[in-house]
Image (tube, grey):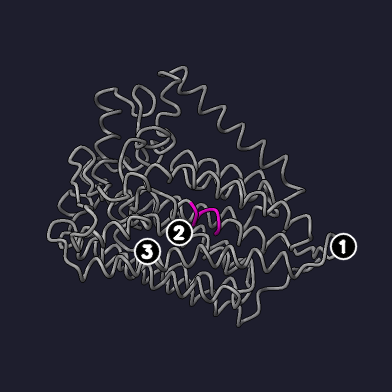
Amino acid sequence: MRIRPPRPEIRNRARSVWLFFTLIHLGFLARLLPFILGGGVLSDVRFYREWAYQALNDGVWEGIDTAWVYPVGALVPMLLATVFGPHLYQLAWFVLFTALNAVAIAVLVRRATPSSYTSAYWWLGATALLGPVAVGRIDGLTAPMVITALLVVGTRPFVASLVLSLATWMKVWPAVVLLAALIVLRKGRVWILGAGVALTAVIAVVVGVLGDIRNLTGFLTAQGARGMQLEAPLSTPGMLQALSGASGAYFFEDTTINTMEVRGALSEVVGALMTPLLVLSVLFIAAFLAVALHRGVPAPSLLATGSLALVSALVVFNKVGSPQFMLWIAAVIGAGLALDRAAAWRYPAIGMLVTAGLTTLVYPIFYDALRYDLQPAVALLLTLRNLLVVSIFVWSLVRLGRLAAHTRGPAAVVRSRGA
């Protein structure tokens, strides 16, 4: 059988995407060049380098010998980034970041649909707007892994599950995307579950043999005692009260974990409710996905929207409000633009780009003015950012409801290619 070459317009669009990819990553490289030439590192990468060489030089392995704030799989990219030595650690981290982004873009371009090209441009734009946290935090690696997995899970569930499981063992949030796939994709459930269990078993054996198996789940309780972080979405009312001096709310700097928290007023009550609300929201969304699937909602739309609802819930009902959390939401929106009708995702796509811009304005540009000077103007930017995050979460719930309501029942199942 003769294989037809891609049509000229498809080749041109693919080249345009790759040109944009190159320009974006050259921009990242230019920004990082002073760090690379000086042997420095950006943002949290300094901790990654410290942990990696602590393991290699001192024999102290985080997550294996001691409890750690990250899942133990996070050691994998941190150790890989030592390939050029400590002086060029930032360069190696940038190479990892670029390679994983390239894989995600390659999968999108290979689909050769208008929605996939839109998704590729959108993701690159969102990544650029979130530049410092994208290239300076481990979430910048897990985000393109999630995009890649969501795009191939329908045809290669085992491979996609391995990618999602590895991403989960690097940073917990992809676990809810794995949950959505397990619920929505009937045919791939055995492969998805099997891959996740197999990888987890291997990691558990390694930790048990080399260290203390109790450290495997240390990350689950590492931050349990902390209060409501200043940037967390549901800290917004307390933050505004503290700025105005009302209701006894105030700011507290926790020097142990280097964060600013909101305390007083109702902040302790809100903080205590975060974990129960998060668990309940995840259970509710998971149950709704099962019902919607039974009603015959197309799997691609359901997977994309359900993943967005679950990931957004992780951000909204979280005591922490780190800027890299925006990468979680952005990754799922990027995949959703390709899996579903791009036009239907106009609101979260535009809203997330604005959110990304506001996030970078708050951190790192004006973060000191917020954290130390408590500038009301910066607090307003953060408030707008948090309102947009909550609105994207609400949008995902509303869309899930509409998808279920507009599908008449199991007989109306639409079997989409790749689902």
Tell me whether circle 2 and circle 3 mark residues in contact (CB < 8 Å): no
Give the number of callouts. Answer: 3
Residue labelled with disc 3: 386
Q: Nearer the viewer, residue 359 or 284?
A: 284
Q: Nearer the viewer, mark 1 or mark 2?
A: 1
Give the mark, 1 or 2, whose residue is nearer the N terminus.
2
Q: Which disc number belongs to residue 411?
A: 1
- The image shows residue 135 at horizontal and vertical percentages of 33, 56
- The image shows residue 66 at horizontal and vertical percentages of 34, 24
Q: Residues within 10 Å of mark 1 (few under 14, many from 20)?
A: few
Image side of residue 363 versus residue 15, left or right:
left
- Res 271 → quadrant: top left
Residue labelled with disc 2: 101
- The image shows residue 332 at horizontal and vertical percentages of 52, 60
Give amino acid for label 3.
Asn
Image side of residue 192 versus residue 278, left or right:
right
Q: Quadrant of the C terminus?
A: bottom right
Q: Nearer the viewer, residue 279 or 344?
A: 279
Q: CA distance from mark 1 to mark 2?
A: 39 Å
Name the residue furthest front.
Answer: 247
Give the mark, 3 or 1, whose residue is nearer the N terminus.
3
SS at mark 3?
A: helix
Give the magenta range. Answer: 308-313
Q: CA distance from mark 3 to mark 1?
A: 40 Å
Q: Is residue 50 visible?
A: yes
